[in-house]
Amino acid sequence: MKPKEPLVPLERTVAVDLGRRSYGVRVGPGLLGAMGDAVAALPGVTGAAIVTDSNVGPLYGQRVSDALAAAGVQAALIEFPAGEASKNLSTVAGVLDALLAITPAVDRATVVVALGGGVVGDLAGFVAAIALRGMRFYQCPTSLLADVDASVGGKTGVDHQAGKNLIGAFHQPAGVMIDVETLKTLPRRELIGGLAECVKHAVIRDASLLDYIEDRAEDILACLGDVMTELIARNVAIKAQVVADDEREAGQRAHLNYGHTVGHAIEAQAGYGELSHGQAVALGMVAANRLAVGRGLLDEQSAQRIERLLNKLELPTRRPGLDADKVWWIMQHDKKALAGRIRMVLPTKLGAAGIFDDTDEQALRDAIEYLGSP
Ligand SMILES: NC(=O)c1ccc[n+]([C@@H]2O[C@H](COP(=O)([O-])OP(=O)(O)OC[C@H]3O[C@@H](n4cnc5c(N)ncnc54)[C@H](O)[C@@H]3O)[C@@H](O)[C@H]2O)c1
Ligand SMILES: [Zn+2]
C-alpha cells in the first residue's frame, strides 16, 4: 500500500548564505499562491514582470499573476517559446522589448519573476541582470532540474552559436519559491533528467541522501508531495552550501561538474536533444566512477550501487554502440580542457569528491568504452 500524504504537508526553507546577497529557498506544495506575499515583502516593490515559456505560462502564469494582484502587485506576463533553442540573445532582445514597453514604465523597483524550467530561470535572470543595469528577480522554478540545480547559485545567461551558456552574468535572485505541485505536469523524461542531478549531489556531498533516494525511489518517480519536498530541500541545501563556499567557482563549485565532463561530450556526440542532459550525466557519472575505482578512490561495490540506483530511476548506465573515439575527441576540444588536460571530478568515497587534473588517457578511454559495453 502507498503511504498516505499526512494532513499537514511538509514545507521547508533553506538559506543560501551569501552575505548581503543571501536569500531563502522555500519548498512545499501550493507555494505559487504565496508568491504575492513574498514579492510584496521585498522593499519598495512597484510592480512585477512574470517571464515564462509557452508551456509553463498557460499552466501557471495566471495563478502567479492572481497571487501577485491579491498582494497589491500588478504584474505583466511575458512569454517566449519553450525550449533550449530559445535560450539566445534574440529572445533576450524580445523579452527586453516587452519589458520596456510595459506601462507604467518599469523601474529598478520592479521585480522580474522567472516562472519555468532552467531555460526560463537562466534567461529571465540574465534579463534582470542587464535591464536598467540590474533589477531584482525572483526564481519560481517548475522543473526538477531547475528546482535542485539551476534556480540556486546566481548563474544566469544564454547560449551562443559557439557553445552553451557562453554569455551571462552572476546575478543572485532575491528569493526562490518552489511549488512541488508544479512537478505533476512536468513530462516524465524531464523529471527523470532532474533525478540525475540529485544522484550527483548525493554522491559528491551526502551519502545519507543516496540512502534516501534508494528507499523512496518509487515515491519519487510517482512525485509524492512530501517526498519531493524533502528530496528538493536536501538537494537545494547541498547546492546552497557549495555555492556559499565558492560563489564564483574558484574550486569546490567545480565538484558540481561530477558526471558532466564525459556527460557533456556524450550529449554533444549524440546531438543535443537526442539524449536528455540527465541521461548523459548519468552515463558521465558511470564513466567517472570507473576512473575512481581504477585509481582506488572508490570501491567496486559503491560504483555498482550507484549504477543500480540510476537504473532504478530509469536513467541509463550503458549506451551500446557509443562512438568512444568521437566522445574522446569532443572532450579534448572542450573549452574546459586546461592546456590539453582534461579535468575530472571523481568521487573519493560515497558523499565526497575531488578534482583531478592527472587523468591517464588510456584509463579515460577505457571508462568511455565501458559505457558502450553490454
Ligand atoms: N544556472 C545554473 O546554475 C544552471 C544549472 C543547471 C542547468 N541550467 C540550465 O537549465 C536549462 C535546463 O533546464 P530544464 O531542464 O528545466 O529545461 P527547460 O526549462 O527547457 O524545461 C524543460 C521542459 O519542461 C517544460 N516545463 C517546465 N516546467 C514544467 C511544468 N511544471 N509542467 C510542464 N512542463 C514544464 C518546459 O517548458 C520545457 O519544455 C539549460 O539551459 C541549462 O543550461 C542552469
Ligand atoms: Zn547538469
Image (spheres, grey):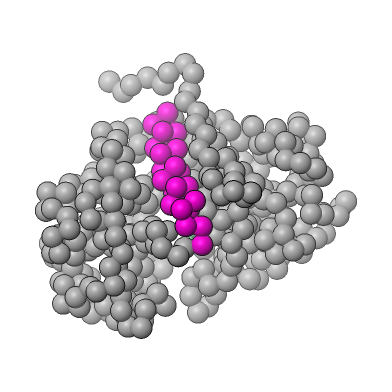
Q: Main secondary structure of the magenta part?
A: helix
Q: Position of residue 294 (x, y in %)?
A: 13, 64
Q: Position of residue 353 (x, y in %)?
A: 29, 56
Q: Is residue 179 left or right of residue 255?
A: right
Q: What is the quadrant of residue 282 in the picture? A: bottom left
Residue drawn 50% across the image and 28% down it = 11
Which quarter of the figure is the N terminus placed in?
A: top left
Is residue 242 located in the magenta-colored stretch of the structure?
yes
Is residue 63 located in the magenta-colored stretch of the structure?
no
Toward the right, the furthest residue is 104
Q: Is residue 214 visible?
A: yes
Which one is nearer the viewer's eye here, 245 or 206?
A: 245
Toward the front, the furthest residue is 19
Q: Which residues are magenta?
A: 226-248
Residue drawn 57% across the image and 71% down it = 167
Q: Is residue 327 visible?
A: no
Q: Does 306 sit above or below residue 128?
A: above
Q: Does 174 sit above or below residue 285?
A: above
Residue drawn 25% across the image and 37% down it = 211
